[in-house]
Image (cartoon, helix red, strand yellow):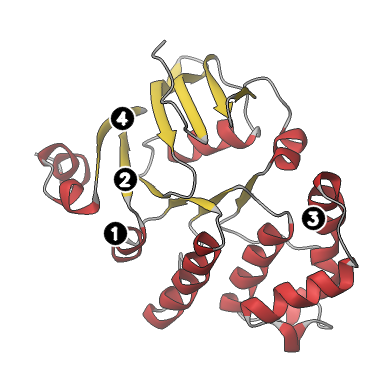
């Protein structure tokens, strides 16, 4: 294995994941610095979701290791990683449908955030989060009463309620209009300005190129490129992966 980058918040070192005879990740190494806006892209089937599932603990890697703040979390279950500060949002929001929008934030606030710090009143904190994300007026509604963009905002608010150190944003803008994409981008920028490190997995290139300071590209389970957005768009290997020969 390689030596993890000093000072990395997240260090994924030689990660391998197989499904039967199929190798979804082949010794992938990635590091993310504290406070960084980091993009992870690649064509369908490239291994992006498998990688973030391994980082978040939804999948167990077959080889390699994952370090978070210098601590080996490779074999740690997902709920313990969440309490350490690794939080992900999902492309398809799955809120608790029987609870109000406000109550949906109470679960991560009590379970993840207050497990790490002695906090104030959870309801007050939840309202403040909804105010920051523009959903305060929807606090007493059930999620079924929200629009698609509001559901995406609720998903991000639920992630924020867990007080992440690292947020993995998985396709948060899929299916949204151009104006709605800008709305979600503004929220992610604000989260980053508050000190949250963000990994963005996204197919909307305009969004990921605008947001990311550094991008890693996967193809067929291997890392094929890394660089700034300008470097990535000029990389022949990336063009080949997306467009073919």
Residue that carries the numbered disc 4 in the rendered image: 223
Nearest to N terminus: mark 1 or mark 4: 1
Q: Tell me whether the residue at label 3 lies in contact with that at label 1, contact meaning CB atoms closer than 8 angstroms.
A: no
Q: Observer-nearest residue: 4 or 93? A: 4
Q: Distance of mark 1 from mark 4, alpha carbons?
A: 18 Å
- Asked where in the image residue 81 lies, by quadrant, the reply is top right
Q: Which residue: 35% across, 58% down?
A: 208
Q: Is residue 44 above or below residue 17?
A: below
Q: Is residue 126 above or below residue 27?
A: below
Q: In this view, does 142 lie above or below 49?
A: below
Residue that carries the numbered disc 3 in the rendered image: 108
Q: Distance of mark 2 from mark 1, alpha carbons?
A: 8 Å
Q: Tell me whether the residue at label 2 lies in contact with that at label 1, contact meaning CB atoms closer than 8 angstroms.
A: yes
State the mark number for residue 209: 1
Q: Which residue: 41% across, 76% down?
A: 182
Q: Which residue: 44% across, 50% down?
A: 201
State the image coordinates of residue 30 (x, y, percent, origin top left).
40, 30
Q: Distance of mark 3 from mark 2, alpha carbons?
A: 29 Å
State the mark number for residue 110: none
Residue that carries the numbered disc 2 in the rendered image: 215
């Amino acid at each position: 294995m390689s030596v993890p980058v000093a000072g990395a918040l997240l260090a994924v070192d030689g990660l391998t994941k197989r499904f039967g005879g199929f190798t979804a990740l082949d010794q992938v190494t990635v590091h993310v610095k504290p406070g960084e806006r980091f993009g992870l892209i690649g064509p369908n089937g490239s291994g992006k979701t498998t990688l973030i599932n391994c980082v978040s603990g939804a999948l167990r890697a077959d080889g390699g290791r994952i370090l978070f703040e210098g601590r080996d979390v490779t074999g740690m279950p997902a709920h313990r990683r969440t309490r350490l500060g690794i939080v992900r949002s999902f492309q398809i929001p799955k809120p608790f449908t029987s609870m109000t929008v406000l109550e949906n934030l109470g679960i991560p606030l009590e379970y993840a955030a207050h497990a790490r710090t002695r906090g104030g009143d959870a309801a007050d904190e939840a309202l403040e989060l909804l105010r920051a994300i523009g959903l305060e007026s929807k606090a007493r509604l059930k999620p079924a009463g929200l629009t698609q963009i509001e559901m995406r905002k609720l998903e991000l608010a639920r992630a924020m309620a867990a007080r992440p150190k690292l947020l993995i944003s998985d396709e948060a803008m899929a299916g949204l209009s151009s104006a709605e994409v800008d709305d979600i981008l503004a929220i992610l920028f604000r989260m980053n300005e508050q000190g949250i490190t963000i990994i963005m997995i996204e197919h909307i290139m305009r969004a990921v190129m605008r947001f990311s300071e550094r991008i890693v590209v996967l193809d067929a389970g291997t890392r094929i490129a890394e660089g700034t957005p300008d470097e990535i768009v000029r990389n022949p290997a990336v063009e080949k992966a997306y467009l073919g020969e």
